Image (cartoon, grey):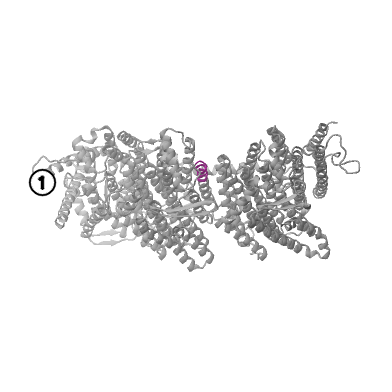
Amino acid sequence: MSQYASLLIALPLISAFFVPIIKAIGKKVVMPFLVLITAIQMGMATWVFNEVYTTGKPIIIMAGGFRPPVGINLYIGHFAALFVLIIAVASFFMAIFSMKAITVEPKDKYAMLSLLLMLGATGMISTGDIFNLFVFMEITAISAYALTAYNKSGEASEAAMKYIVLGGIGSSFFLVGIALIYGSLGTLNMAQIAQLAGQMNPTVAQAALAMLVFGLGVEAELFPLNAWAPDAYQAAPHPVTAMFSAFVVKAGLYALARILYLTHAVGSWGHILRLLIILGTLTVVIGEFSALRQTNVKRMFAYSSISQVGFIAVGFALGTQAGVSASIFHMVNHAIVKALMFMAVGYVALELGGVTLEDFKGLGKVMPLTAFAITVGAISIIGIPLFNVFWSKIQLILAAMKAGKSGVIALILGASLVEAVYYIRLIHLMWFEEGSRERTRIKENFVFGTIMLLLVALIIIIGVAPNMTWNIVQKASADIYNVAQYIKNVPLLPGVSP
Amino acid sequence: MITSMIGIALKAFLILLYATFVGFMFMGIIRIVTARIHRRVGPPIYQPILDTIKLLSKKSNITHGLIYDFGVLYALGATILALMFIPLGSISILRAYGDLILITFLLEIPMLGIMFAAMSSGNPWAGLGSQRALLTLLAVQVPLGFAIVALAEFYDTFSTYQIVMAQQTAGWSITYLPLLLAAVAYDIVLQAMFGKEPFDIMIAPGEISLGPMVEFGGKHMGILQIQHAIALFAETLFFSNIFLGGAVVTAFASSILNTLASLGILLIKQLAVLLIAIFIGAIFPRFTIDQAARFYWKWPTIIAAAGAILAAL
Amino acid sequence: MNIGVYYFGAISLMLIGLYAILVKKNLLKILVGLSIMETGVNLLLISIGYIAGRSAPILSEGIGPNQAVDPIPQALVLTAIVIGVATTALALTVAINLYETYKTLNIEELRRLRG
Amino acid sequence: MINELMIIIFTPLITGVIAWLLDIKGLREGISILGAAVPLAYLIQAHQTLTSQPSIQYSIVISGFKFEFLLYHLSWIFAMIAGVVGFAAVLGMASTTKDSYEWLFALMSLTGVYGIFLADDLISFFIFWEIMTFGSFMMVLKYNRKASLKYFLLSVLGAYSMLLAIGILYAKVGALDFTTIQQTLYQDAMRGVLGTNTLLSRNDMLLIFGLFLIAFGVKAGMFPLHVWAPDAYSETNQSYTAMFSGVLSKAGVYGMLVIYILLGTRLMYQFGRIGAAPKFGYVIAFLGGITIIVGGLLAALQEDIRKLFAYSSISQVGYILVGIGVGSALSIEAAIYHAISHALFKGLFFLIVATIVLRTGKTEFKDMGGLAEKMPITFAMTFVAILSLAGIPPLVGFASKWLLFEAVIHENMPILGGMIFFGSAIGFVYLIRFTYAVWFGQRPTDLDDTKDTPIPLAIAMGILALLNVVFGIAPGLVATELNKIFGKEIIKGTIWELNIGFGRYNGLLITIWLVTGIVIAGIIYFLGAKVRRVPVTDTYQGGNPVTMEYNLTIRRNFFLPLKETLAFWLRISFDRLYQDIGRWVEDLAETLRNYIYNGNVQAYAWYLAIILLILALWGV
């Protein structure tokens, strides 16, 4: 029965190829088809989620029946189940949002690309083989390049070009890392790598780990490597930006964390952690500071999302169980809030034609529901109690302090102080300042309103009663943290070694 | 219970009469001594009493409203209250509660009452006068504070009665250096509290036509004269009690003789304090308000602070 | 020839590619540099799987599993090449679109999105 | 059933949310007043239970943290302050609130304050601290962005420094609840005394104390961190400011007490003592002293009625800080007593300001005047409030100030004693300035039809004025509660009297003798002739004709000479310093962004190359 979980990968793939046939049937049908597929994917993901969380055992799928390490296996543990669900839900919401948000003509290309994006992210999270991870990462990356360039405007192509060049360098060095690991360990299966990691000689291991971290750093937007991110977020169509910040970055981060904790037996593990903490803190600080005087609200949210992701990277790089569970909790909260914020900004851009601060002036009167959604999102991002991001921020800060990183936390708290400034300016702009030109109140779309209110309700529910989410997150962090359990779960063929 | 109540009431009445009478005598002495310094004869000693009686019996009185009257009453009431606390030889009533800080505050409160009344009259001179009075109070507070702190730390108690008793055994407090400094500072402060020459900018007759007093006439002025008399008496009494050793005479057999003797000694000490104030007043010209503030925040504060620090060691 | 030459070749190819990206001003030259780097990486992958004195891993009658070199890196390289092709194709379409809108391919001028 | 502590803490928030959602003019006021009354009722009822058992306990586990709540004597007193003044403020708000979202955030800040006083572990303390800050911030946001931003930034800076301190403690002690931290630090001090090396090093303690000091200093409005208070207190719904300055500043004071409870012995061991006061306490006391002087002097120079009371509230909190800083049992009790009296008369004052602003619509001194005839009830309340704040004997202000003076001077602190004395005069000075400008003198023509206070505000003011008088005449009531904190009888004396060995104060006696004095004066007054009522314009003005347009008054710039004498000191302003820092940070952010994200792909590629280089060098 559990083999049906492989449908999670198969379904988007097959339906992506069916899209041209659907287009032949009728141009209007393509977008509803996308919504249908994402709905099915969401259904399956929920089934897999409660299957994994009730039985407590991860689902292992062997591609082609070959047992690992010969065959490639999908390992849907607690973390993967949780995040596949988040990806499915986010893409479902964004599919509905893109029904209206996407106006540029070849809509079937959009449907295909967004399915591939979802496929790539799901694959990255659930794969158990390092090269398979590279392939899924490339699928996500290429569909991301295409989606960034989707609007065909000068800006979109410029952003895509930057993304391609930097992403290309990143992925080729990632491949070098895989080559080094394969060269010294002879295996590509993550579980076996974890087993044999101790035997690698330190310098090769150090170089391989550095390359892998570098490659994934570009995907997970760590400080110097994330230069492409603000432009890509700004130029991409609105639902795509929401998907970017909700799960594409998260997949990169997950891969980073998975590889990091797999190879914890490697001699020079401490160096990489210290490097990652420095990069993460820099991401937070530079991200926040750059957002301070931003006039384009979408770009401001992009910087804020980058800095939150940097904070998650610091959480992973602490090397303690508390750090990992706190950062996963932060990932979940961040996904919810950022999906809401980017959807709301997209909707404002749709209705008012622009996302500069000028358009946001007096939004409270013109689009009260969207303004309310953005305000709740902004307040929860700042870290006010009774909202969801507060709990994960507190956990992260205490985990970091426990790990003795008080200097880092001081910097990060200073940065979140800066973050509070520009979000409050935005809130004040929306509610208490008069728009320059008189605008009547726009009747907001009912469907988008319900989605936004659903996300707002989710934020407040997690904020007020975080226990349930916290237990899920703790199981998910155990899945990543104790690698011994991971190795035991994967049924390795005995006796096969280089 | 009732007899003791009547006894206290009678004693209170006697103290009040004695204080008002002596207060008016002091006002008379001020006039006569300043006159003699100016080489003129000066009015008879009972002249202030005559003026007050004339004012009280005035037929046509004006009022600017309830607060205008209540302010004056409040000023006199507070002064009487202050009087009761200061130990007067052995016959004062609320001696046990005569607390240093309480009395210092009570001696400042009449000014609040007068200012309330003056300001409610709506006269700009009154406003200007009360502003200057407030600034003088602000300026005076620092040296006064340090002097009181010096005293409290030296004797390690706040009750004036205990201080007086301590001085009986250990000699006057001005014999000790810290308290001498405090006494000097307090004396300069007294100059402003009496409203005497160098610091009486607040009631300068020529410049702002008597400041807060401009609108008062008839019985209001009369009540304020009584208040001024009692205040003079109370302030000099307080100074002589805490710095000049007060007076607790037990030599004679009968208590009446004792009280008379102690009142006599206190009177002499009070006169001494008054005369110092008169002499300084007669010599100095009037300071402007910011000069007064700067002066108070420089020398008297340094003297009093030195006293307080020495007392604390 | 020992394996060192291939490693040296692969790494130098990657560095040349990187050099092209970092220095050249024209966008197309950068994309060319990118694909050079990818070929360098593929060469590195292949040379890792190389075992001296063995033939290509195509099973024909004369060659059994222990006569051929290690086949797995070869499989990886196949997918890597396909991915390289896809990325370069997409990059070129974007470059065409850029040229149509901005009439230039010089990196210095393609700086609308900044700050 | 749900524990009563939970009811006390969360009823205001729940009613606030309901009031915000319902948004029906009459109903939301009723619900919100109910929301403020219920916790008060529970607290009064809890007083009985506290006589039988030492404290009421409650704990709950949320997302991996064990939250504990504890109601014992000290927290009961502070909660009662919050309850009474909060209820009065909410009553006042019933007549001055225009839109419903103000109810939500006012009651949210009330929940935050209750939570702080009842919290028994650092994390719930921090959470409620944030809720309080956020609630009060949103009240200010609507009126003025710059003021609210300044307020929010400083208090979030405080909150985050507290979080850092909590983090260090959590890392070293491993636990978060007060009892364990207290014990471990106590043992740590003992270990230090015996000479073995201690858990926390010297600069750890310095850092923790510094961070806590900043956190609570911001909220209490201590000297260098007080700049937010004048703007925040004046730029919001004035009856909310009664709660804002009366209750929320007490959270900062309570925080200082928490420093004593948690770190007291450890800091005492680490830094020793100056004279009688612990060294770390002396820092708090000295800063408190400066706050008194700065707050008072600036209050006297203000032109806006709300700003005057904002600065006055800062200087009054300075008193409390001095009391806490001195650190002897008596001085801490005096400080808490002054906290109670400050909450009462400051709450009353801001309600009065609310009425004035509501009725006249004006906030500047220059266009007010002569309101005493038009608003007699409010003036009566103002008279009580003035007597209380200036520290005139029969009222609570004097009782607490007297206790504070005695406690501080008894500890041989000459400098602090001098500062306090100076403070008491300043209180006197700016009050008269306020009364002259608002109540007396010529009345501008447009204020002729001002009505008196609306009913709910009148009730609220009545409650606070009554308490001011009652606690003044019978200080023993409060003294018995205060003694329960330390268990032993520090302030002896009956219900009417405070007797602390070296000083005695009897509220009842003074009132009786004051009344007799006034009666005597009254007798003399009525012996005189009948009095003719004369209008305010009929005064001697040196021959100038007195007409409405040309009425001479010095409402504006009342204390010009004081401003001249202090000219040198007024040039130093921390407000401008913080603004320059803010601007500098923003410019830095601007240049940083333009350099790093300069849009050139090649530059980005160079970043990647640099990272590769670092990896290569680092690795080998």
Residue D600, image quadrant: top right
| A287 inside magenta stretch | no
Name the spot of residue D40 as percent of width and height, x first: 41, 60
Q: Residue furthest front?
A: A495
- At x 76%, y 58%, the residue is A11
**Nearer-the-camera pick, D165 or B149:** D165
**Nearer-the-camera pick, A13 or D153:** A13
- Pointer 1: residues within 10 angstroms few (<14), some, or many (20+)? few
Name the spot of residue D484 as percent of width and height, x first: 34, 51
Magenta: predominant secondary structure element? Answer: helix
Q: Which stretch appears magenta?
A: D162-172
- Callout 1: SS: helix
Quadrant showing the N terminus of chain A: bottom right
| D171 inside magenta stretch | yes
Quadrant showing the C terminus of chain A: top right
Visible in this render: residue B42? yes
**Nearer-the-camera pick, D154 or D590:** D154
Which chain hosts label 1? B
Name the spot of residue A131 as percent of width and height, x first: 76, 45
| Pointer 1 residue | B256
Amino acid type for the residue under numbered disc 1: Ile
Residue A437, image quadrant: bottom right
Q: Left or right: D353 with respect to A409?
A: left
| Image position of A258 with respect to D197: above or below | below
Q: Which residue lies furthest to the left in this view?
A: B253
Name the spot of residue D411 as percent of width and height, x first: 33, 40
Visible in this render: residue B188? no
**Nearer-the-camera pick, A27 or B72:** A27
| Image position of A449 with respect to A289: above or below | below
